[in-house]
Image (cartoon, rainbow, N blue to C red):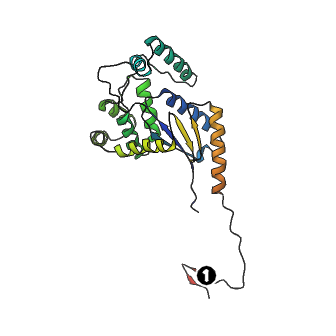
Amino acid sequence: MIKIEKMKIEIWSDVMCPFCYIGKRHLEQALTELPFKDSIEINWKSYQLNPDYKNENGENLYGYLSKNKGISLAQAKQMTAQVSEMANNVGLNLDFETSIPANSFNAHRLIHFAASKGKQDLAEEQLFKAHFEQAKNIDDINALLEVAAKLALDIEETKAVLESNAFEEEVRFDIYESQQLGVRGVPFFVMDRKYALSGAQPVEAFKQAITQGYNEWKATQDISPLKSFNTNSDRTCDENGCEV
């Protein structure tokens, strides 16, 4: 049996989703309170809440929510105020007044590119920040290059990636996987492909789910030492030759 060094937590997420940002903070808080946090590997997966969306008329977030959810502008503002309060409780200051609705496909491609450089989690964090706190259009190549600069990625290489179709298949495969797993909304957390947690759950719920998944995963990794069966002969070979 091949021993896997860390238990994997896969997270289907969209940069456009405030609960994904809040859920990220809840997960991070949960991990800081678990003694085995260094044995956990986080793997972000692409998901698009509105894959056909294109902001062509400078639409703001309230207009976007009003149109897509069939609610009034006043209701949209009330909804986001409630989300802002949740975010404030975990130290996030989401600015829905200036947040720009955008198609997130290229942002997901950037995350995959950053992952190839060992910077996936940092990319996820910076894109959330760009969208929710810095009024950046995450479908704009210049905004994505600003994020790349903060990640210390090579700008010319990043620009070449974004101007090509690189990592498109990786994004689509993540979305295909989500469909196979029955994901209907994000954030969606999967522990070792055995346990799933949907939504920005409380920290305690994360701790319980991760602990249960980890304990079962750990049981499959702990292999008892082999017991020696002694005989009178020791016919073995090593780098020095063979015993006869």
Q: Residue at x 53, y 33 (%)?
A: 24
Image coordinates of residue 155 in percent, x first then y, are 31, 39
Crowd around label 1: few <14 · some 14–19 · many ≥20 (10 Å): few
Residue 35 visible (yes or no): no
Point out the image quarter for the C terminus.
bottom right
* Drawn side of residue 62 relative to residue 91, left or right: left
Residue pointed to by mark 1: 236
Q: Nearer the viewer, residue 170 or 232?
A: 170
Give residue 45's position: percent from left, percent from top.
Answer: 46, 41
Percent coordinates x, y for residue 161 in the rendering = 30, 42
241 shown above or below 156: below
Q: Which residue lies furthest to the top in this view?
A: 74
Q: Is residue 136 visible?
A: yes
- Answer with the quarter of the image where residue 14 lies: top left
Residue at position x 72%, y 85% from top?
232
Residue occupying the point 34% across, 33% down: 144
Give the vertical position of 130 relative to 159 (above or below): above
Residue in the picture at 66% in, 83% down: 234
